[in-house]
Image (cartoon, grey):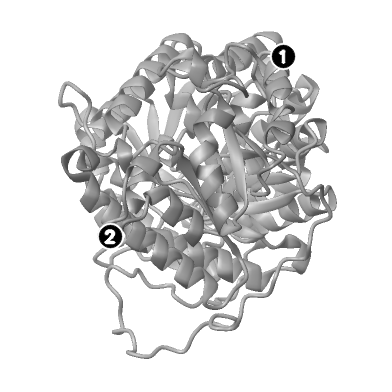
Amino acid sequence: MKVKGYQKLASLLVVMLLVGLHTPAYGENNSKKATWIWQTDLIRDGGAELLDFSREEGINLIYLQIDRQLSSDIYEAFIERAHEDQIAVHALGGDPRWALTEHLDDMLGLADWVIDYNGKVAAGARFDGIHLDVEPYVLANWETEQGQIITTWVQNLKAFLSLASGKGLELGIDIPFWFDQYALADGTGLNEWLIGAFDHVTVMAYRNEVESEHGILDLTRSELELADRLGKQILIGVNTKEMPGESYTTFYGHGKDKLNQKLDHLSSALGSYPSFAGVAIHDIRNWQSMSSDEIVPPGSTDPISPSPVPEPNPVPEPGEGDRVPDADPVTRDPMVRGTYIWEAHEVVQNSQEILDFAKEKKLNWLYVRLDLEQPYSSYSSFVKQAAAAGIEVHAMGGHPIWALEENRPRMMRLVNYVKNYNRAVEGDERFHGIHLDIEPYVLPAWKEDSQQVISEWTANLDAFVTELKKDSSLEASMDMAVWLDKYKVTGEDMSLSKWMINRMDHVSLMAFRDVAEGSNGIVGVSKEEIAFADELGKPIKISVEIKASHEGDHITFHEEGAAYMEEELAKLPALLKDSPSFTGSVVHAYAYWKSAKP
């Protein structure tokens, strides 16, 4: 009897051991371990490589970016295989512009597509949820129009939730850890509303320390406490992507073993929160590329709380301090035809679409706003392809608050990023210059004391050019309103426009009118600035608008359309034939031009 009992006990232990070996590598079955797949093309072959990696790492939830042009058969095959491995698949989509009323249909289109797809396929091939990644704070006007953007974003999300709820889909959204500083118009915290509205929220707590003063635990405590109170789920997101200059925000270089140790520690530390549902690792491609060994990049500590104390004279990273190599010349027409690309994610995610558009419109010049959190590889291929197509690419950045002295470091961060990028890449992958769009006249401070703002603005621009030119031949340029000539530089008898034209290598004059000729036409409103540029021997580009404008139809070509705009732009070379400073035109902006009426 005892022998049989021991045999049964031994058999039970063997079964328990085998079950334990087949448990996901991280946590229990009800603990989520998620990842993002942004490159939808990776599932075209069935996604075997992705699913093999997912099994090895214990992933049980995939956020899969949706390409609505991809055949449903491809999604069916991938989801069925994922479900066989007990991996849930949520349709992933998002764009910062989805926070704006005019782009609501894009977001609802994702929900409609998923609902329609799920209605046509077998149960085993259906999406388990929809996951949004919107991040409206990367919009160019976030810092000056946060309240309005938050209001329209919440309205859009309510419409999305109304459409997608009750369809058997788990609804989730990504949010940064610092959203707790914002509130809705009624006083409700933005985080509280988002956590309460969705089934789960993934908090992007992008740090590589768990328990430091500014570590993951410290940064996510308020979200977890909120979710506990609301009875909702929280996933904690960490990052594995290379982050130049901000390596404290990522596990890049730390190795998979260290990452897994930190995730185990994090899971254990957060186990007391009922709302803690698991972790999410951003993203699968960067995660796959990690080695097992730790190779921590320089600057991996959080700069808010550096330890050890930085040396007074630190040794620069390799390449820093060397002269910035020049970009290879681009073979192009001397007369510029260009546009602005304001949405930083477009170049990263839709580079071929941009290049196709540029070819169609015969463009040879691009101002491209940069996301400074992206690795250099995000831009190098695009710039190389653009150069091969005869397109000169200039990095772009700016915000109204960059005119204020206190925000000069933001400008310098862009300068340093571009310099170090150009040091790291090949000649045909380098940016040709840095273009600023600042426009501080929208700030309350301008109305209060415009001359003080001008004083700080010109000082910042002077510092920008000085820093840029001290070790590079990068071109310094900026956008300039046509009416700035009525202001004087502080302490000098010189118009602000003339000072800017003189200080920059070139300016793009925002001559926002919808007709070339006439006293209030493009040439008419530009005559003073063009005369300054002729006198100073500086090139000037004419920038026109095709975005809808609340300032009046005469400001933009939106009503007339792209063909009429081209007719008017074609008149400029003849009208300005006696002005050697005129070197071309730039259309504001790509996002509006590509969707403009013909």
Callout 1 environment at 10 Å: few (<14), some (14 to 19), or many (20+)? few
Callout 2 environment at 10 Å: few (<14), some (14 to 19), or many (20+)? some
Q: What residue is rendered at 18% in x and 45% in y? A: 449
Q: What residue sits right under mark 1 in the picture?
A: 598
| Above or below 74: residue 16 | below
Q: Return the x and y of residue 174 as percentages of the image width and height.
A: 43, 37
Q: Return the x and y of residue 476 as percentages of the image width and height.
A: 55, 60
Q: What residue is rendered at 23% in x and 45% in y? A: 450
Instruction: Identify which residue, 319 or 254, lies in the foreground.
Output: 319
Q: What residue sits right under mark 2 in the picture?
A: 405
- Answer left or right for 248 relative to 362: left
Secondary element type, mark 1: loop
- The amino acid sitting under disc 1 is Pro
Tell me, yes or no, if residue 146 can be seen here: yes
Secondary element type, mark 2: helix
Distance between mark 1 and mark 2 Cα atoms: 43 Å
Q: Return the x and y of residue 137 as percentages of the image width and height.
A: 39, 39
Instruction: Identify which residue, 189 or 359, lies in the foreground.
Output: 359
- The amino acid sitting under disc 2 is Glu
| Above or below 227: residue 537 | below
